[in-house]
């Protein structure tokens, strides 16, 4: 099918597929839907781009792809991780807020360097500030699991920088989630699953992580001109998993009978915490008079979750034996509420212009706590449950986009011109926790604050905001029938740090029918988040001699931080280059291979703790501050270079009365540090060095995520059966700990293979039953060495994408009507 034929099919049901357009227009032509594999709306405003005709790589994942990749209780993030080798979505544990909101990576970059859209509109991030996580430390990631998977029609993943088209955050790429827009029919689905695994460290067979999920959605026509309203609900309850080994009792704990009596037991609980989540969503369109169409969509999530923390021994200064005679293991708690609402209109602005205008509101509120804990310094008066603090992020956006076709000299066909503007306001706020969560009580030889806390103090509460204005221009078209080009430019102004100008040039050249070269050049940026600019956190305890002391995470604007070398944060800036080719050497066989380089200047990381007698003396002399035992803050301390390649191949053919598909997706990326900022002169004068970025953060940026992943998927379907088998190779990962005094235990975990399979049978009348499993070979990461396994309690690391939960089996029943 020619590109011109594609354009004619699309024009039968849509005015434009622009940045702000919803996906409802794609349903206008049954012929187009049946004939075209995927019309891509992400990263290009041309109306005739498919997966293999885009000038930059775009993956398109269908509703069925996502359903089969997310087993019972599965989330959108898990599904993307199963399907996209360049997408990393690790299960973190004993990691504070990261136990409750998981961070995702694209192409090995930071979680906040990928932009997420829903129906082409910018998605807000979470309010959680991850300070204890390995992946995504110091970032505010988008919560993929707040987007219900039964709401998704398809996902488009642009694997290329797109700052000139979308603004901040699109350094690694863009993920555009397009909502279900069916105007008739509905679906009800129920599923159940659990982990069942042979756990080698304790020679046990474990069954846990039991998960139930219920989903329902329904759509109806509105009016007689293609209007629709579709809505759904998703409820999931997941049990905890525990992959602790036998406790050897750390040597630095009191070797007393009460403590030693616990030797050999599973006292810790690394793994997934409990969670209960309800998601609501809707998507709608209403045609008005003429060419005007109104639309609205939104999502709402309420989630309660728990996370693991380290065990406190019976005979320990962190325990009050009369409260916990056998010791205790705190559990962090999170109440996460997420709301997104978008309303807009699109239509004809004039004879030649199509427009889209919208208003977008997003809010995330996170209430952080801890239970089964205590503040040992309060003795028997201590509560056992604490509220640690509240976090909230708000985003309000107004967008106007307009597109038209223009005849330009030298172009073989009319080009597409797009112009647009965006006004956005963001705000970030924190509130203090219970006084008991950070209090230092009268028990002098006991630690202050809630164990597995402490809470935010009143002095750390922050409320900050900023305004953003952006304008862009985008021009794309065919210079010749073989050469397609796209050029874009954008200007953004941030009230808190200044301006950013970005541009992009991309092109695709068809060498022979079915064979093409493609590439792009762009510069991109990521504005520092409000949390990175303004977050404050204080831990108060007793130091030598029982005097109160503090360790503080300070905003860069704080005078103490500035006196120690902190500077106002700058935007991260990248230079992106990609080059690749696409091929269709035979009917049903598609292939693409893309190489890329991403150079990022001024990456934002959290500094190491700055401390020492000279620092204390300096702060006393300069500010009259005593008892400040350590300070850290965010910095633009490093530059990085990421190089990689992505391979995607698929083969489709009729087989035994059905359709056989075989897909291969492989990704390779490697990040190197190309610059580390010198120690600020103020610190060097105090004899402090190498504190802007530490050993563990270097590991996180360069080798904690797998360099390689490959996914091999086979499916066969007919009118009744749907069979799936998937083999995934997860590449090596490396863990480095820095325990001080030059003690940096290091381990590289071997590559692992994961096998998934599913069988589904579709009965007449809309009923379908499925049975399946993930990690059917019950594979685990390499066992952690003694220096990393924390005295046998943590036998497996969270870094490997295969996780540490073992095999998972599930069943699903679905009724479509």
Image (cartoon, rainbow, N blue to C red):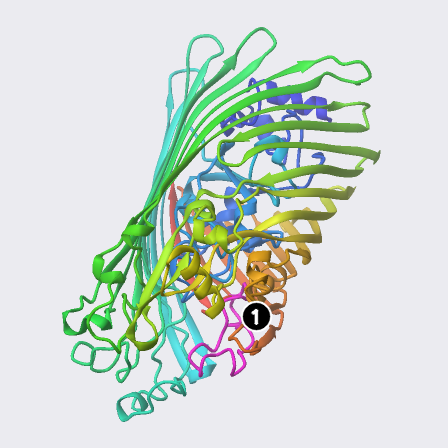
Image coords of residue 558 (percent x, y): 43, 48
Q: Is residue 787 magenta?
A: yes
The residue shown at (43%, 47%) is: 763
- Residue reaching furthest front? 621
Classified by dominant secondary structure, the portion drawn in magenta counts as loop
The residue shown at (43%, 22%) is: 344
Q: Measured along the vertical axis of the image, is residue 784 above or below residue 627?
A: below
Q: Nearer the viewer, residue 586 or 574?
A: 574
Residue identified by numbered label 1 = 735
Image-based side of 500 in relation to 774, left or right: right
The residue shown at (79%, 18%) is: 411
Image coords of residue 773 (percent x, y): 47, 63
Quadrant (top left, top right, bottom left, bottom right) of the C terminus:
top left
- Residue reaching furthest right? 512
Image-based side of 310 in relation to 52, left or right: left
The boundaries of the magenta stretch are: 775-802
Image-based side of 395 in relation to 313, left or right: right
- Residue reaching furthest bottom? 257
Q: Nearer the viewer, residue 462 or 360?
A: 462
């Amino acid at each position: 099918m020619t590109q011109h034929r594609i354009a004619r099919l699309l024009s039968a049901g849509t005015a434009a597929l622009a940045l702000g357009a919803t996906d409802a227009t794609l349903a206008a032509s049954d012929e187009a839907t049946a004939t075209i594999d995927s019309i891509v709306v992400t990263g290009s405003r041309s109306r005739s781009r498919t997966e293999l005709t885009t000038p930059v790589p775009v993956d398109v994942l269908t509703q069925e792809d996502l359903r089969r990749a997310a087993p019972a209780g599965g989330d959108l993030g898990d599904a993307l991780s199963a399907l996209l080798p360049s997408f990393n979505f690790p299960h973190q544990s004993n990691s504070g807020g990261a136990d409750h909101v998981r961070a995702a990576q694209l192409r090995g970059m930071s979680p906040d360097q990928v932009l997420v859209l829903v129906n082409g509109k910018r998605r807000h991030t979470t309010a959680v500030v991850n300070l204890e996580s390995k992946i995504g430390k110091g970032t505010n990631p988008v919560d993929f699991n707040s987007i219900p998977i039964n709401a998704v029609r398809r996902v488009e993943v642009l694997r290329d920088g797109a700052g000139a088209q979308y603004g901040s955050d699109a350094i690694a790429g863009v993920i555009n989630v397009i909502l279900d827009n069916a105007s008739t029919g509905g679906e009800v689905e129920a599923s159940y699953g659990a982990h069942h695994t042979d756990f080698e460290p304790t020679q046990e067979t474990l069954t846990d992580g039991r998960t139930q999920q219920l989903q329902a959605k329904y759509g109806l026509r509105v009016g007689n001109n293609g209007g629709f309203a579709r809505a759904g609900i998703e409820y999931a309850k997941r049990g905890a998993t525990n992959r602790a080994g036998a406790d050897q009792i750390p040597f630095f704990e009191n070797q007393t009978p009460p403590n030693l009596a616990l030797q050999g037991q599973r006292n810790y609980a690394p793994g997934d915490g409990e969670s209960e989540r309800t998601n609501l969503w809707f998507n709608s369109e209403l045609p008005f008079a003429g060419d005007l169409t109104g639309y609205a969509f939104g999502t709402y999530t309420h989630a309660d979750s728990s996370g693991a923390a380290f065990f406190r021994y019976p005979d320990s200064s962190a325990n009050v034996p009369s409260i916990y005679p056998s010791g205790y293991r705190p559990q962090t708690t999170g109440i996460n509420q997420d709301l997104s609402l978008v309303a807009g209109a699109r239509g004809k602005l004039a004879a030649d212009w199509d427009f889209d205008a919208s208003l977008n509101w997003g809010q995330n509120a996170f209430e952080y706590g801890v239970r089964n804990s205590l503040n040992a310094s309060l003795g028997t008066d201590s509560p056992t449950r604490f509220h640690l603090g509240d976090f909230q992020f708000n985003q309000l956006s107004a967008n106007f986009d307009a597109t038209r076709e223009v005849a330009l000299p030298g172009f073989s066909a009319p080009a597409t011109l797009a112009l647009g503007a965006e006004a956005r306001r963001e705000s970030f706020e924190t509130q203090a926790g219970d006084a008991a969560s950070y209090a230092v009580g009268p028990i002098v030889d006991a630690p202050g604050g809630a164990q597995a806390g402490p809470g935010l103090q009143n002095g750390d509460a922050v409320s900050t905001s900023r305004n953003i204005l952006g304008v862009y221009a985008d021009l794309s078209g065919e210079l010749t029938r073989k050469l397609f080009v796209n050029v874009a430019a954008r200007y953004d102004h941030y009230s808190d740090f200044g301006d950013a100008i970005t541009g992009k040039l991309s092109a695709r050249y068809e060498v022979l029918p079915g064979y093409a070269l493609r590439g792009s050049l762009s510069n991109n940026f990521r504005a520092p988040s409000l949390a990175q600019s303004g977050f404050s956190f204080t831990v108060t305890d007793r130091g030598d001699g029982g005097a109160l002391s503090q360790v503080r995470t300070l905003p860069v604007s704080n005078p103490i931080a500035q006196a120690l070398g902190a500077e106002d944060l700058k935007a991260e800036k990248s230079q992106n280059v990609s080059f690749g080719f696409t091929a269709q050497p035979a009917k049903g066989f598609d292939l693409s291979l893309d190489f890329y380089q991403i150079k990022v200047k001024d990456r934002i990381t959290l500094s190491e703790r700055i401390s020492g007698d000279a620092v204390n003396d300096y702060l006393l002399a300069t500010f009259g501050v005593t008892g400040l035992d350590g300070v850290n803050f965010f910095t633009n301390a490093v530059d990085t270079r990421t190089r990689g390649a992505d391979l995607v191949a698929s083969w489709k053919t009729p087989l035994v009365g059905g359709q056989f598909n075989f897909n291969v997706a492989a990704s390779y990326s490697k990040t190197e540090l190309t610059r580390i900022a010198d120690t600020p002169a103020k610190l060097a004068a105090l004899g402090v060095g190498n504190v802007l970025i530490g050993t563990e953060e270097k590991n996180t940026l360069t080798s904690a995520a797998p360099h390689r992943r490959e996914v091999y998927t086979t499916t066969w379907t007919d009118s009744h059966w749907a069979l799936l088998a998937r083999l995934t190779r997860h590449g090596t990962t490396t863990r480095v700990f820095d325990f001080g005094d030059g003690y940096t235990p290091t381990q590289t975990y071997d590559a692992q293979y994961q096998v998934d399979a599913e069988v589904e049978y579709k009965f007449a009348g809309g009923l379908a039953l499925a049975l399946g499993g993930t990690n059917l070979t019950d594979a685990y990461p390499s066992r952690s060495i003694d220096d990393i396994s924390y005295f046998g309690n943590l036998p497996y690391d969270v870094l490997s994408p295969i996780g540490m939960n073992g095999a998972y089996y599930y069943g699903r029943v679905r009724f479509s009507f």
